[in-house]
Image (cartoon, rainbow, N blue to C red):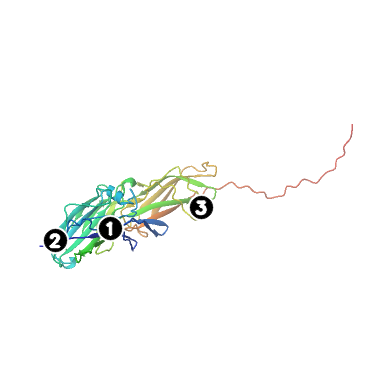
Amino acid sequence: MIIGLKKIYIKLTLKINNQKFKIMKKIIFSCVAVATFALGCSKIEITDTNKDAPGAINFTNYIGNVTKATDVTTPLALAGIGGFKVYGYATDKALASATTVSLLMNNISVISADDGVNWTYTPIQYWPVDSDNKVQFFIYANPASGALTNWSALTTSVKPSFDYTSPASSADQKDLLYASAYNENKHGTTDKVDLTFKHALTRINFAARTNKEGVHAKISSITLANVYEEGTFTYGAGNSTGSWSGVNTAFTNPITYPIKTTENVAYHSIDFAKNFQESNASLMLIPSNNSTITLQIKFTLYNTANQAITAEITKNATIDGSSSAWEIGKNICYNLILDDSSLTPIIFSVTSNFNWDGETGTGVTYN
């Protein structure tokens, strides 16, 4: 039997791209560059804030920049989306040799009633007294509404998992986060459980340019078809990355990338523009190695007088996920060159001299 008496301190720290961030007494904003795109980083720290309740787990929260719709950039914003959820399992020994598992924290909602200053939950839980007993923590945050279902509990041989269905609309997609901590116990008055948050989905964006000087474009639409809609996520061992399985059912209709159809996409010889993206445009999709994803983009080309020089052009491409997979936590930006190979400018040239003919003298007769 596992009996809890001692206080649990829990500290949550977001770790992205193997960089770890701790936040104390202030909000810090950080970004990790990945290839040609930026990934926002968020930090959460949970510590004891209720000195009048010995043995209780209490929370305070600091958070930086969580990417994507709606962006969670402050404790106030995290409070506004409902905080995060905690599962905790008590085991008689370290998990590898445990013979019993009992539920300690059952999908506990950690919320704030004062705009992110203090964080609370019920019922209050406690550390096991026996030093052989351990607690296994599994946390998720910011799922899309109704997307996360069928939680499968921890056993001595199987890690927890859940089913996830990605919303079809970009506006409804969220940056799903997860964390875990294994074999935790109370060893001193200041020990804290250090949870490392990671991104569970793949983030997709687009950038574009034209390749003819003096020519700009307006994009009508960008869509992705044959994108997988649902799958099962399983927590990894220790701090290792989780994994997806059962990812094989595609959305019925193409996914639309949110754009501003009135924005001009300019010419540049190297750089790709993102000015046509709507705010929070990122697609948050289930990772896969799908080799049949198809991209379609529609656009019209214009000259410097803003006169259309083409009808609407439709381009199609296949995104081969078998060679460049949509990996868990990966942030991908596809660079699009907007061109019409049949478009040939009218060019004038002067190739010969145009001197006057030789002068001819002609007499004049007076009246």
User: Crowding near pointer 1: few (<14 within 10 Å), some, many (20+)?
Assistant: many
- Asked whether disc 2 touches disc 1, contact meaning CB atoms under 8 Å apart, the reply is no
**Residue at image coords 72%, 49%:** 353
User: Crowding near pointer 2: few (<14 within 10 Å), some, many (20+)?
Assistant: some
SS for dot 2 = strand
* Quadrant for the N terminus in the image: bottom left
**In the orientation shown, which residue stands out farthest toward the top?**
367
Q: CA distance from mark 2 to mark 1?
A: 23 Å
Q: Looking at numbered disc 2 in the image, what kind of residue is underneath it? A: Leu
Q: Is residue 32 above or below residue 278?
A: below
- Asked whether disc 3 touches disc 2, contact meaning CB atoms under 8 Å apart, the reply is no
Q: Earlier in the sequence, mark 2 or mark 1?
A: 2
Observer able to see residue 348:
yes
Q: Which residue is mark 1?
A: 45
SS for dot 3 = loop
User: Whole-percent x and y of residue 127?
Assistant: 16, 61
**In the orientation shown, which residue stands out farthest toward the front?**
52
Q: Is residue 307 above or below residue 51?
A: above
Q: Quadrant of residue 26?
A: bottom left
Q: Nearer the viewer, mark 3 or mark 1?
A: 1
Q: CA distance from mark 3 to mark 1?
A: 43 Å
User: Whole-percent x and y of residue 77?
Assistant: 31, 49
Q: Is residue 96 shown left or right of residue 228? A: left
Q: CA distance from mark 3 to mark 2?
A: 65 Å
Q: Earlier in the sequence, mark 3 or mark 1?
A: 1
Q: Which residue is mark 2?
A: 5
**Residue at image coords 39%, 56%:** 38
Q: Looking at numbered disc 3 in the image, what kind of residue is underneath it? A: His
Q: Looking at numbered disc 1 in the image, what kind of residue is underneath it? A: Glu
Q: Nearer the viewer, residue 154 or 248?
A: 154
Q: Which residue is mark 3?
A: 268
